Image (spheres, rainbow, N blue to C red):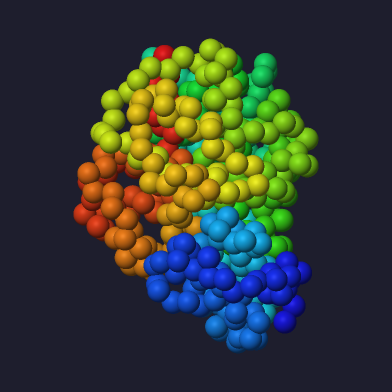
Amino acid sequence: MDVGRYAKYAARMCVGCGNCVDICPSYIATGDLDNSPMGRIGMLRRGASLAELYRSFYSCTMCKRCAYFCPLGLDVAEVTRQVRDFLAKSGLRHPYVEKVVNNFVNRGNNIGMPPKVVEMSVRASLKKIEKEKGAAPRVYLHDGVRYIEGVTGAEQRPGGRVALLFPSSSDIFEFDLALRGYLYLLDRLGFNVVISLKVPDTANYGYFLDNASMYKIADMYLAEISRVSPHVVVFGECGHGWHVFASLVLPRSPAPALHIHQLLHRAYTKGVLRLERVEVRKPVLYMDPCNYSRGVAPLIEEPRTLLRAVVGEYIELWDSPRKSLCCLGGGGLIAPETLNTAVEYWKRFDIKGVGTVVRPCATCKAQLKRVFNALGLDVDVTGVVELVYRAAK
């Protein structure tokens, strides 16, 4: 089987020590050894059928936790990515993941909303910002050819410092407080904000499907950066999206690019952004998104510094960010049909009594919100940007 060079390497090198088994989210959720990193390597070694590979490797959240417990540092998330590419070429594609990829390729966002709906959502957020903060920020919408009229400050091409913002589509349509945060805070820092109606998202589900889709979506980001020609590109709260963006887009971007946390952290530590404490339900529990703590461009201190500034004390479940557990929504497992598995998984962790969970990733927020609802837990779920928005003076 031509499952990819790294997958073959991992299959040769794994010593079967079992360190990765009990710490694997999909094994914790199912108790099935085949749904563990060691089990998946074993399937490659014994030449499992395509159907067996599909079942096992599409239960992987691609969280990379195994790599930090493996004595050889073998990353079975990368093995999974290569095996899924092989499965796709063999005609086996996960229906939900493929649907999300097609939505992005055709509409520029995971949900598949047309540009007009994105525009309406941005307008609604601007009105809320004006009501909450007293003035609407300077925001421009680019349709891939020109700037459309009728949005605050968008009667002409933006001047001054231009920031091209890639928010998450979930933050546009579900967690709009985060969208308000992006728009308001960038405006406060002196940027004219541009949102592309062609690519108003942070995700890259091609990472969960196959190489061709992953690179195609990465090229969509690059094309829009070239069209807008901003002074800076700002990426929103999305774990896997940031990992892929930092790997494939950032090195080739014609404009400097950074994560919203990096920008806000820099502004706060230099005294440019003033923050005050906000009221939240306590205790506050912070959880690292997998690809912030274990991805190619880690975000560890930045969100913690901002969180301390706006809520004060908070707690964590693990003694190291590298040990953080997946929300069980990564890798495409946020698909509706796997909700019960996620619910059983979260039953194993005691978060009763927690008032607010902070997990700054759109996928994580969506997954935890529905899991906690299913468990009957009265817990607020938020990212960091929402809190900073409320705290900004």
In this rendering, position of residue 352 left or right of residue 304: left
The reply to whether residue 117 is in sight is no
Q: Position of residue 386 (x, y in %)?
A: 41, 32
Up the image or down, 318 lies above or below 209; here it is above
Foreground pick, 101 / 82 = 82
In this rendering, position of residue 248 left or right of residue 358: right
The reply to whether residue 226 is in sight is yes
Q: Position of residue 102 (x, y in %)?
A: 59, 61
Query: Residue, x 53% and y 65% (percent of image)?
Result: 20
Quadrant in which the C terminus is drawn: top left
Q: Position of residue 326 (x, y in %)?
A: 46, 55
Query: Residue, x 26% and y 33% (percent of image)?
Result: 281
Query: Residue, x 60% and y 58% (percent of image)?
Result: 67
In this rendering, position of residue 347 left or right of residue 30: left
Query: Residue, x 54% and y 37% (percent of image)?
Result: 300
Foreground pick, 324 / 281 = 324
Up the image or down, 372 lies above or below 21; here it is above
Would you identify the image quadrant in which residue 250 lies?
A: top right
Quadrant in which the N terminus is drawn: bottom right
Q: Position of residue 96 (x, y in %)?
A: 50, 66
